[in-house]
């Protein structure tokens, strides 16, 4: 704190003996710094984040409720938001991993945007495999990137996709089943289910 780090509630923050934090960094309450954490200047670490073996460059934003595991390398102005986990991965300058996301054994290129609920499927039961996400790529919400796979520079992944093949630069990729809509079927199902529930309730009462 005397060196210019702001701790909003220092009594709630846990430091390891080797924690390094640069000046003008803000640390909110209830943050855990495990071994091997290095933070440069001007970062913001939001509440309830947990970090071990992570490197965080200047002006990054982490959390709240983020987990950075060993090998997490956040470059300048990168963001890892709420309920995200990063392991053995580089999040390059200005890239955003904002919500409910797992990035493991991967590179997220500069300026890329990773949508909510995205996961890198990096483990096949035997080996850890790599996902490469290019500069400026956009990965839509609820996508699964099945490693090994490459998303090219400027690539665009449609929401809800399961991507199993590499995507060229500036390409759009869909990996989901086509929606089918049956008019009136919702009402029919509700009536059928309600009738069955009523019959079960009547049988139980008898």
Image (cartoon, rainbow, N blue to C red):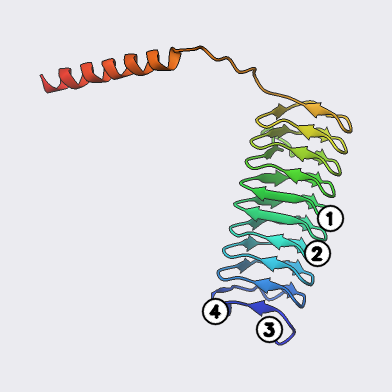
- Residue highlighted by disc 3: 1
Q: Secondary structure at mark 3?
A: loop
The residues bearing labels 4 and 3 have C-alpha atoms spaced at a distance of 12 Å
The residues bearing labels 3 and 2 have C-alpha atoms spaced at a distance of 19 Å
The residues bearing labels 1 and 4 have C-alpha atoms spaced at a distance of 32 Å
Q: Nearer the viewer, residue 188 or 49?
A: 188
Q: Which mark is residue 93?
A: 1
Q: Residue furthest front?
A: 183
Q: Based on the displayed image, in which of its 4 quarters is residue 120 positioned?
A: top right
Residue drawn at (73%, 56%), measured in percent from left and top? 79
- Residue highlighted by disc 4: 11
Residue drawn at (54%, 74%), measured in percent from left and top? 12
Counting labels gives 4
Which numbered disc, 2 or 4, marks the residue that appears first in the sequence? 4
Q: Based on the displayed image, in which of its 4 quarters is residue 41 positioned?
A: bottom right
The residues bearing labels 2 and 1 have C-alpha atoms spaced at a distance of 9 Å
Q: Secondary structure at mark 1?
A: loop
Asked whether the residues under the numbered discs 1 and 3 touch, taking CB atoms below 8 Å apart as contact, a structural biologist would say no
* Residue 66 x %, y %: 62, 56
Does residue 88 appear anywhere in the picture?
A: no
- Residue highlighted by disc 2: 57
């Amino acid at each position: 704190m005397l060196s210019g780090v702001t701790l909003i509630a220092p009594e709630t923050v846990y430091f390891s003996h080797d924690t390094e934090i640069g000046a003008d960094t803000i640390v909110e309450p209830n943050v855990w710094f495990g071994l091997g954490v290095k933070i440069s200047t001007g970062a913001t670490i939001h509440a309830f984040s947990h970090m071990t073996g992570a490197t965080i460059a200047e002006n990054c934003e982490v959390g709240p409720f983020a987990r950075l595991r060993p090998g997490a390398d956040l470059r300048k102005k990168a963001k890892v938001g709420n309920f995200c986990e990063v392991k053995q991965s580089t999040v390059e300058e200005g890239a955003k991993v904002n919500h409910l996301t797992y990035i493991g054994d991967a590179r997220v290129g500069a300026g890329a945007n990773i949508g909510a609920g995205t996961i890198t499927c990096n483990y096949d039961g035997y080996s850890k495999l790599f996902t490469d996400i290019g500069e400026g790529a956009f990965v839509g919400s609820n996508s699964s990137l099945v490693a090994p796979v490459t998303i090219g520079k400027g690539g665009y992944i449609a929401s809800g996709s399961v991507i199993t093949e590499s995507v060229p630069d500036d390409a759009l990729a869909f990996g989901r089943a086509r929606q089918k809509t049956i008019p009136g079927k919702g009402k029919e199902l509700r009536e059928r289910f309600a009738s069955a529930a009523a019959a079960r309730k009547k049988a139980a009462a008898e």
